[in-house]
Image (cartoon, helix red, strand yellow):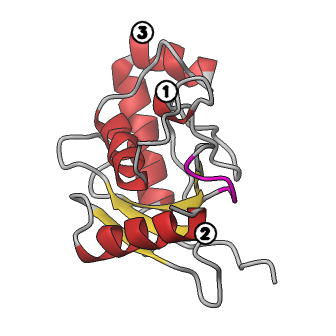
């Protein structure tokens, strides 16, 4: 199956029966290699009722290389860079752990699960991870403040490069 065929099939599945709390769409005039994802934080998490934008970029050699997933909405989280890049540290996305049989919807579910259960022992933001482990009240207040500031409206996505 070619990369485009696989992506088209996965996109159809993700848009018609998306994982819980996740909406997938393509940006206007974009190829199927870029997905815009709106992720609603799990109710049990400190990030509820936030809605977060994720940009999923599928490489031309997908599924043999993992997708690149990043937050477009700022989030205070030990596994996400606390900047405009929104890079995510997630085990299944690491090249050495990636399996071609993994579907994008499984990746999105794993990202959503990361909101409910951060992984402070594999952080991108050491300071936030330390706070999560040692001062949970301060961590939760800062996380909620950022949800209020950035994640209560519709997520914004960067303008597509033409």
Q: Where is mark 2, residue-wise?
A: 34
The crowding category of the residue bearing disc 1, from other C-alpha atoms within 10 Å (few below 14, some 14 to 19, many at least 20), is some
Q: Which mark is residue 31?
A: none
Q: State which quadrant residue 34 falls in.
A: bottom right
- Residue shown at 61% from the left, 68% from the top: 33
Q: Where is mark 3, residue-wise?
A: 134
Instruction: State the image coordinates of residue 149 (x, y, percent, origin top left).
Output: 49, 59
Q: Which mark is residue 91?
A: 1
Instruction: State the image coordinates of residue 61 (x, y, percent, origin top left).
Output: 67, 53
Q: Quadrant of the C terminus?
A: bottom right
Magenta residues? 59-63
- Magenta stretch prevailing secondary structure: loop
- Residue shown at 53% from the left, 69% from the top: 35
Q: Earlier in the sequence, mark 1 or mark 2?
A: 2
Instruction: Tell me the SS state at disc 2.
Output: strand
Instruction: Tell me the SS state at disc 3.
Output: helix
Of 162 and 143, the residue lying toward us: 162
Instruction: State the image coordinates of residue 84 (x, y, percent, origin top left).
Output: 70, 53
Furthest residue toward left? 44
Any part of residue 72 in sight = no
- Residue shown at 47% from the left, 64% from the top: 6
The crowding category of the residue bearing disc 3, from other C-alpha atoms within 10 Å (few below 14, some 14 to 19, many at least 20), is few
Cα gap from disc 1 to disc 2, whole angstroms: 21 Å
Q: Earlier in the sequence, mark 3 or mark 2?
A: 2
Cα gap from disc 3 to disc 2, whole angstroms: 38 Å
Relative to 20, 142 lies left or right: right
């Amino acid at each position: 199956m070619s990369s485009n065929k696989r992506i088209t099939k996965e996109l159809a599945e993700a848009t018609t029966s998306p994982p819980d709390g996740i909406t997938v769409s393509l940006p206007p005039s974009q190829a199927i290699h870029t997905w815009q994802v709106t992720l609603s934080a799990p109710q049990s998490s400190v990030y509820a009722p936030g809605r977060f934008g994720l940009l999923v970029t599928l490489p031309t050699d997908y599924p043999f290389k993992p997708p690149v997933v990043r937050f477009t909405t700022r989030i205070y989280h030990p596994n996400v860079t606390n900047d405009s890049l929104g890079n995510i540290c997630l085990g299944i996305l690491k090249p050495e752990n990636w399996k071609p049989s993994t579907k994008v919807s499984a990746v999105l579910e794993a990202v959503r699960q990361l909101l409910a259960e951060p992984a402070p022992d594999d952080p991108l933001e050491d300071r936030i991870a330390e706070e999560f482990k040692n001062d949970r009240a301060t961590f939760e207040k800062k996380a909620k403040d950022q949800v209020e500031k950035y994640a209560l409206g519709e997520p914004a996505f960067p303008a597509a490069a033409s």
